[in-house]
Amino acid sequence: MTRDIKKIIDQHPKTDKNFGRVKFLNFGSSSLDIMVMYYVKGTDWDTYLDTTEEINFKIMDIVKKHKSDFAFPSTTVYLNK
C-alpha cells in the first residue's frame, strides 16, 4: 500500500519528486499509522488545495484496493431509562 501511495505522489505533476515520503510509522491503539508527506510545487493556495484533494482521493482508492479502511474513533453513549 505504501508503495502505491508513493507512486501516485511521485507521478503527480504538481509534487516535488525528490521529497515524497510514505512510511508505515506506528501501531496506534486502533490503527496502523501511515505517514504521508510531500511538497506541492508553487505558492498558490488553490493549487495546494486542489493537489492535496486529488492525492487524498487517490489514497482513498488505494486503501480500498488493498481491502483496507480508515480508522475512526468511536464513541459509546449510554442512556438511562
Image (cartoon, rainbow, N blue to C red):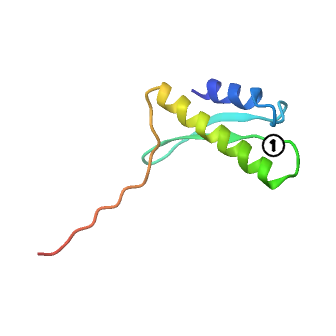
* Helix, strand or loop under label 1: loop
| Left-right relation of 78 to 9 | left
Nearest to the observer: residue 43 or residue 70? 43
**Residue type marked 1:** Val
Q: Is residue 56 above or below residue 72?
A: above
Q: Is residue 48 above or below residue 69?
A: below
| Left-right relation of 28 to 15 | left
**Point 57% across, 26% down: residue:** 1
Which residue is label 1 attached to? 40
Nearest to the observer: residue 26 or residue 57? 57
**Point 55% across, 29% down: residue:** 62
Q: Is residue 41 above or below residue 43?
A: above
Where is residue 25? Give x, y as percent.
61, 39
Q: How many marks?
A: 1
Where is residue 39? Give x, y as percent.
80, 42
Where is residue 2? Give x, y as percent.
61, 28
Q: Quadrant of residue 55?
A: top right
**Point 45% across, 45% down: residue:** 71
Q: Quadrant of residue 18?
A: top right
Mark 1 residue crowding within 10 angstroms, few (<14) / some (14–19) / many (20+)? many
**Point 54% across, 31% down: residue:** 61
